[in-house]
Amino acid sequence: MTTSRKDLERTSSDGEIDAFLEQVARTPQRAEPGARGRLIFAMDATASREPTWDRAADIQAAMFQETRDLGGLQIQLCHYGGFREFHASPWCASADELLPRMTRVRCAAGLTQIARVLDHAKAEAARKPVNALVFVGDCVEEDHDRLAGAAGELGLLGVPIFVFQEGREPQAERVLKDVARLSGGAWCPFDHRSPQALKDLLSAVAVFAAGGRKALTDFGRRRGGAVLQLTHQLEKR
């Protein structure tokens, strides 16, 4: 067992990681043959998120790298912070396009705006299919029913939400689990001590968005660790 996996277990139980990976495997993959997968990567950029944001550039680069041989991936970066500030980048097909945008972001104190993330994802999906939405955050300061309704609408549009929650704030956990479930996606906790495990799990979602289950199985066999469990789940089906 790797050190990163041990770190992850301080926040996530084996059962929670297994459940997340199994849900990824069950999610229908809707990428058109030969088309780039499209993934919205949304992050809370309020003040509490600064340490994780600083590591996000490395994670984004890994997601592009892992999907390069699958036809590639388009990522749109979304983030909120400060007083009702919300930004969405153009769709980027390489780390070189996206990373300069990420490094210009500065985290600022403010309330969560998850509903704006979900509404934006719905608008994008209405224009052109989106294969997945990743959300990384640690708290929720919005109406549960409002978020649940928007998540359900994204599920109907075929956009599963994969939620990565830093820490285990109970109210946020309850809401974010519902957001993931109602969209047909999955939820998984992490903490700052598990950067490699988080990178691998996010890369697994990117590989799924770009290449489907077979690509995800191959990725799990190459990467091992937490992601390898996904291969085992797939082989049982």
Image (tube, rainbow, N blue to C red):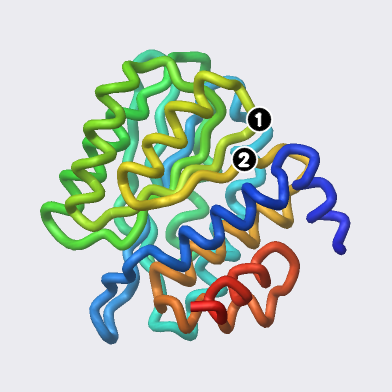
Q: State the image coordinates of residue 82 (x, y, percent, origin top left).
A: 44, 17
Q: Residue at x 64, y 62 (%)?
A: 200
Q: State the image coordinates of residue 133 (x, y, percent, origin top left).
A: 37, 50
Query: Does residue 101 appear in the picture of this structure?
Result: no
**Front residue (pair 140, 65):** 140
Please determine whether, in this image, residue 149 is positioned above or below residue 233. above
**Front residue (pair 137, 235):** 235
Q: State the image coordinates of residue 88 (x, y, percent, origin top left).
A: 32, 42
Residue assigned mark 1:
167
Q: Residue at x 28, y 74 (%)?
A: 31
Under mark 2, the amino acid is: Pro
* Crowding near the residue tagged with mark 2, few <14, some 14–19, many ≥20 C-alpha atoms within 10 Å: many
Q: Residue at x 46, y 49 (%)?
A: 186
Labelled pair 2, 1 in contact (Cβ < 8 Å): yes
| Number of disc labels | 2
Spatial separation of the CA atoms under disc 2 and disc 1: 7 Å
- Determine the secondary structure under disc 2: strand
Under mark 1, the amino acid is: Gly
Residue assigned mark 2:
189
Q: Quadrant of residue 73?
A: bottom left
Q: Is residue 2 left or right of residue 26?
A: right
